[in-house]
Amino acid sequence: MDWIEVVGLSGSVLSSITFIPQVYQTWKTKSVADLNLTMMMIVFLSTVIWLVYGVGKELLPVIICNGIICFLSLLLIYFKLRYAKK
């Protein structure tokens, strides 16, 4: 593994963990008023597109990062729909 692969994987990990605090806080508090569903749908769609690209190009950092962010954004969308006040 060369240094550029290490840089890519490091960036992938850092990008992936950015959603973890929001997912944890939302799960813990069940508060979704400040989550914007449109933004979360855009994030989800963009990560799906990047994931397809990463798989097509066999780019492991892109696959890892976008796979994790895709899952976490899907969780936030689920929380938004589940915990939204009717």
Image (cartoon, rainbow, N blue to C red):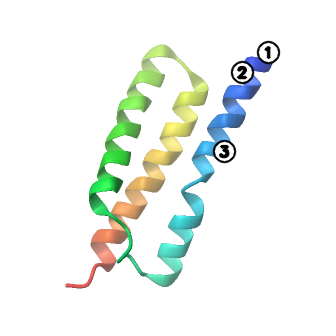
Q: Residues within 10 Å of mark 1 (few under 14, many from 20)?
A: few
Residue on which the image places disc 3: 14
Q: Are marks 2 and 1 in contact (CB under 8 Å)?
A: yes
Tally of marks: 3
Q: Amino acid at mark 1?
A: Asp
- Amino acid residing under circle 3: Leu
**Location of residue 56 (image quadrant):** top left
Distance CA(mark 2)–CA(mark 1): 5 Å
First in sequence: mark 3 or mark 2? 2
In the picture, the disc for residue 5 is: 2
Q: Secondary structure at mark 2?
A: helix
* Disc 1: which residue: 2
Q: Residues within 10 Å of mark 3 (few under 14, many from 20)?
A: few
Residue 42 versus residue 40 in the image, above or below: above
| Tag 1 secondary structure | loop
Estimate the spatial distance between the alpha carbons at disc 1 and disc 3, rounded to whole Å: 19 Å
- Image position of 44 (left or right of 9): left
Disc nearest the viewer among 1 and 3: 3
User: Between disc 1 and disc 3, whose residue precedes?
Assistant: 1
Image-quadrant location for residue 1: top right
Query: The disc labelled 2 sits on which kind of residue?
Result: Glu
Disc sitting over residue 75 in the figure: none
| Residue for point 32% across, 41% down | 45
Give SS at disc 3.
Answer: helix
* Whole-percent x, y for residue 16 in the image: 58, 46
Answer whether labels 3 and 2 touch (C-beta < 8 Å). no
x then y, percent, for residue 73: 42, 54
Q: Residue furthest left?
A: 86
Against 38, is 10 above or below? above
Closest to the observer, 78 or 41? 41
| For residue 80, side relative to residue 53 (left or right) | left
| Distance (Cα) linking label 3 and label 2 | 14 Å
